[in-house]
Image (cartoon, helix red, strand yellow):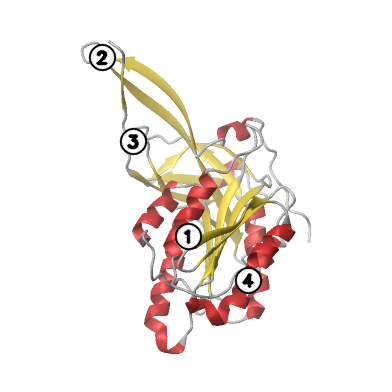
Amino acid sequence: MQPMRRPPVPRLFGALLLASTLTATSSAQAPQSGATFHTETAIVSLNVTVRDQANRPVGDLTPQDFIVFEDGRPQKIAMISAERIPLSLSLLLDSSASMDRQLALAQAAVIGFVQRLQPRDFASIIDFDSQVRILQPFTNQQALLERAVNQASASGATTLFNALYVALKDLARVQTSSAEEIRRQAIIVVSDGEDTQSIVNFEDVLDAAKRSQTVIYAIGLGSHAGGKRRRAASNAFVLRRLALETGGEAFFPESADELAPIYQKVAGELATQYLVAYAPTNVVRDGRWRSIAVRVNRVNCVARTRTGYYAPSPTIARTAR
């Protein structure tokens, strides 16, 4: 197989992607009220996965191959990059009592991802039952990560939503070593999808995920339990929805033999995603949800990304009298 050709990376692209949106703000003072109203032009950045009909990543696309729609309106793409960007990855392990029979399989899944990390990647290990514990803060030391995974034991209730919320906030605090360094953020959660004791509800964690730049991948274990099909279907819906809204994917393996291909697919996807940036034509600061769709001009290729973003909220800055 020939190696995939990658488009050249513009020098300015890193600067464009220092945050989820970069803003250029201009002020106009209202003389009677003393208020300064800010207008904002934002650059929206997307992690985009493109696969062909054989489910293989496509890595040789150019800006002309992409079409981005916001609220159904085509947008002008500023630039794209297929450069492999280091990861900040949160690995979430469900160690509740409901996972008792699946825990060894879950640990193998998490270790499988740890072993595929690149030297510049950082990962953390979070396990959850009745409580949420950060077993290993962000590090690039695989031995420390594997040791943390092996500490988990099954007991207690399930606080899946609490754990996801903690992981999202933890990722938001990850510091880069320089102003130019960009990190792709992702969560991989291994769980049966059942939540029995979280303080945070599903809608709250879904909203937090949609407001972040984090891609969520889910591996649902035990989803084929015979006498609990209705509950299993509900749990699977939770995992699928979190993945769909953030541009990730949910997997439901029926045996341990299916795990290795999942590791390979997710690791390969995170390594070959495009970063696509555009300046939205709608610059109104109304805090509303803006839906996003990405298409590619290549036969039998499908693009996947997050479903949208929230526009900046309206602000009024008071000036000194």
Q: CA distance from mark 2 to mark 4?
A: 59 Å
Q: CA distance from mark 1 to mark 3?
A: 27 Å
Say which label, 2 or 3, has the lower sequence index. 2
Which amino acid, by three-letter code, is at mark 2? Gly
Tell me the element at label 3.
loop
Which amino acid, by three-letter code, is at mark 3? Ser
Say which label, 4 or 3, has the lower sequence index. 4
Tell me the element at label 1.
helix
| Residue highlighted by disc 2 | 34
Neighbours of disc 4 within 10 Å: few (<14), some (14-19), many (20+): many
Of badges 4 and 3, the one in the foreground is 4
| Residue highlighted by disc 4 | 107
Are discs 2 and 1 less than 8 Å apart at CB?
no
Tell me the element at label 4.
helix
Are discs 1 and 3 less than 8 Å apart at CB?
no
Neighbours of disc 2 within 10 Å: few (<14), some (14-19), many (20+): few
Which amino acid, by three-letter code, is at mark 4? Gln
Of badges 2 and 4, the one in the foreground is 4
Tell me if I can see residue 298 in this picture: no
Which amino acid, by three-letter code, is at mark 1? Ala
Q: CA distance from mark 4 to mark 3?
A: 41 Å
Of badges 2 and 3, the one in the foreground is 2
